[in-house]
Amino acid sequence: MPADFAYLNAIGTAVPPHDVHDAFIAWANERVEARARPLFARMAARAGIAHRWSVLPGVDGASAVGPGGFYADAAPGTAARMSVYADEAPALALAAIAALADQVALTGITHLVVASCTGFVAPGIDQIIAARLNLPPGVERLLIGFMGCYAAIVALRSARHIVRSDPTARVLVVTVELSSLHLQEESAVEPLLAMLQFGDGAAAALVSADARGLALGRPFAANLHDSADLIRWTITDTGFAMHLDGAVPARIGTALGDPAFVATVTGGLAPSSLFWAVHAGGRSILDAVQGALALPADALAPSRGVLADNGNMSSATLMFVLARLLAERPAAPAGVAIAFGPGLAAEGLALRFAA
């Protein structure tokens, strides 16, 4: 018999050891035109980010942009960046899985769902993770690639469908992103501010029919009209170039001003009555969501906390927000998870805490 609900039982998270945020700001400040430096400094200070983490080490305590670091000389080619991804992405994913295993038993895994958009390797990162965990060869795998920040929703939605169709399923969901592998040789303010948002991180979760944690409810998805060019990843000879248009927050705010779209997102409930897991794509995006929905001042505190401590880790970010909600358990019994990404698209899930 199909299961009525699938539950996000627990989440483990991991970040690499190298804090690169201040080093990046210093590096970018040297590159930007002198007349634009006050604007860059002002926007960097307003970003709401204190730390971002990278798998890339520096030399003698410096960062990857320092002397002898990965980015010290000519921009590394895509092959060199993917070589680092092949080594470091599985290692960071396994660290998150270990953190999950400290909370819940990972025996009897039947499915592995992995989301990652910052690298490619074959055999896939899903196969690498499965082999290193010694998962049985019959475990079914799904790799979600290049969907960007909302890939966590797609991974959880897929796990939900699996569990609802097979109540005995135990789905290991992993998101791992190494955004710091894609630093670009830019000197304009807008692309430097886009790169300033991103860091590395991984999260792992168990989804099952066991009624503990967060019930994964009704999913929703929408493409925002006339917005396809606002968020883009372009594969270049020197990594993946991110384009994050400054118009994104206003476009999201406009969409959330549409009562029909808001009703789709909230299931017809008052936004202020819900708890919110919003992808921490940037301070201005969080401000746009909060303002458009007239949310209380502290409604997005988990998202703002993740942004401050980690920056935007693409698909892993929302999982970090959900981990905070699981730990803090807000008073509202029902909530919404929502993320925005390339397209410009919105993906989400209704949530509620298990009794």
Image: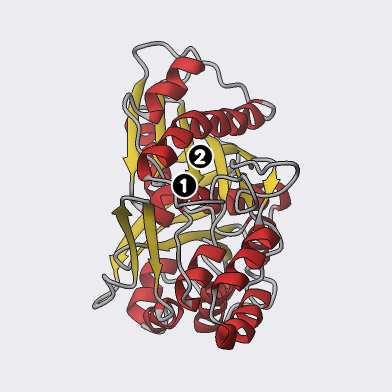
Could you tell me if residue 348 is visible in this image? yes
Q: Quadrant of the C terminus?
A: top right
- Residue 297 position, x and y percent, is 68, 78
Mark 2: give few (<14), some (14-19) or many (20+) Cα within 10 Å. Answer: many
Residue that mark 2 sits on: 7
Looking at the image, residue 6 lies above or below residue 188? above
Judging depth in this view, the residue of 319 and 107 nearest the camera is 319
Residue type at mark 1 is: Leu
Position of 156 with respect to 286 (left or right) is left
Contact (Cβ within 8 Å) of mark 1 with mark 2: yes
Could you tell me which secondary element the residue under label 2 belongs to? strand
Q: Mark 1 to mark 2: distance in Å?
A: 6 Å
Mark 1: give few (<14), some (14-19) or many (20+) Cα within 10 Å. Answer: many
Could you tell me which secondary element the residue under label 1 belongs to? strand
Residue that mark 1 sits on: 216
Which residue occupies 42% across, 71% down? 268
Instruction: Name which of mark 1 and mark 2 comes first in the sequence.
Output: 2
Residue type at mark 2 is: Tyr
Judging depth in this view, the residue of 116 and 138 nearest the camera is 116
Looking at the image, residue 185 lies above or below residue 298? above
Q: Quadrant of the N terminus?
A: top left
- Residue 205 position, x and y percent, is 54, 36
Could you tell me if residue 3 is visible in this image? no
- Residue 80 position, x and y percent, is 42, 38
Which residue occupies 33% across, 78% down? 260
